[in-house]
Image (tube, helix red, strand yellow):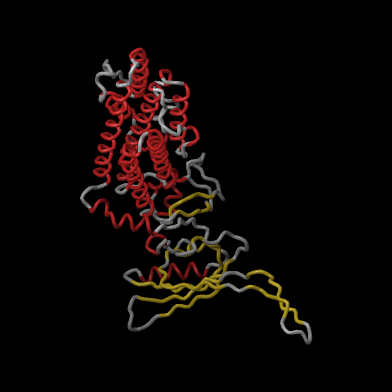
Amino acid sequence: MTWADNLLDASYRGVPINVVGEDLSAQRALSQHGVPYVDGDDVEDLGRGARQFALQVVIFGENYMLELQNLLRALDTGGTAELIHPIYGSVNVTNATYQVIHRAERRDYAEVAVQFLESKPGQPFFAQQFEFVDTSTLDMADEAKWQDGVLDLFGRLDSLVSEIQSWIGGGWTGLMEKVLGLPGHTLRLQQLRSQILGVVSGAASMAKSTSTAFDPLTDLARTPTEIRSAIQGSTPSTSTELLTRSGIPSTMPGADALPAEVARTGSGLLAKGRQGEEPDEDTLPDAMPDDPIEAVAFALVVLVITEFALSYAEAVGVVIEAETDQLSLSPEELERLVNLVRSLIQSAILLHRRVYEIETALPVIEGLRTIAALIQIRARQVILQRPPLITRRVESTASLQLLAHRWYGDNTRAEELLRLNPTLRTPYGVATGTVLRAYAN
């Protein structure tokens, strides 16, 4: 974490202050018990005393006199008050001493040395939640420079998605040619048609459309195209719809046409994707089944899961990129979107790793891993451009609009407070003492 990303706007009793230096000190009360003629003492720790915050504040500029007057009025007010420390955040303190220094050579400028004492024992201190910065990940982002600056996130995703779709289409065609070339398989061709058309029809129903009749055994390349078109047509485009995961079905499309075990596997992966959770590897086969019908069924599951992963990666990528211009999602909501894509991509990777040969699977797996990395790094950059999240206690009953005006001087940020506190039941009257999550500035 860096100063540029995490320093807070300092204030005391709501009066903004420009801090140019700070010192934190604390002393523990120790009781020493010595014994005559014995070297050393028994030391008993009786606890820490109040933390002492020494701040060096400067006031300058056209409004220097007014700002100095406001600060002195706040410092002369007795009792405990909230100090927003630039590093440690919200602290309840009592003003112990202050000293104002003017110098003739610096007009409209004053230095104020203030010392505060922590006034409440046991209060939360430095409770901000920080995330470990993996410098190798940041180096990766800098080194790649989003593919040397030639392609933005949209362009890179579109390029990768197109490549992966061509690879999985080729894998499907190769498998079907192999299956149809097996001797003595004529009697089971109708079963193959039924399960392929069942999955295609199930995918089309998600997009509230119908697929044009075709013979999947003579037009091999059309099956992945039909599935892709249906999934793209059913994928939401807004962040609200994506967060509800309404576009991901709870069961495998066309499950009735597939063998029961294969249908359960596909449905289980989609269920994990809806929750943004890691897929259960134990439900996956160790290799492509020898039975041609089951092999084609698993290939259909691979097509569906991979197309879901690609379609949602593109949709989430658009939402994340829009967040760079206008912040509308909380960090938790961005994380949920990333987890949604990551779960689907992980399911697709596991399927390709298990059921296809390494030459067929590797290009798809590498492409999917790159997409996941792009989405994760870009979302991280968007989250880090926001001010730090802190918790603030409501001092008196107020609406979110009034709180936004008190805290930020902008009542329109009430919507932001509501997004950060989705469980709040009474935004029109937030009770005294309620603790809300809010951006520091």
The quarter of the picture where residue 363 lies is: top left
Q: Residue furthest right?
A: 36
Q: How many marks?
A: 0
Name the spot of residue 159 as percent of width and height, x first: 24, 41
Picture coordinates of residue 272, whole percent (x, y): 46, 34
Q: Nearer the viewer, residue 157 or 175?
A: 175
Residue drawn where x is 35% and y is 72% of the image? 60
Q: Which image quadrant: the C terminus?
A: bottom left
Q: Vertically, is 164 above or below 86?
A: above
Residue at the location (72% across, 78% down)?
32
Horizontal placement of 250 versus 318: left or right? right
Tell me which corner region of the image, top left, top right, bottom left or bottom right, holds residue 144: bottom left
Residue 210 to residue 408: above or below: above
Q: Residue furthest front?
A: 183
| Vertical position of residue 357 compared to residue 441: above or below | above
Is residue 83 depicted above or below 419 in this figure? below
Q: Position of residue 257 (x, y in %)?
A: 41, 18
Percent position of residue 9, x then y: 42, 62
Say which residue appears at 46% left-offset and 71% top-offset.
72
In which quadrant is the N terminus drawn?
A: bottom left
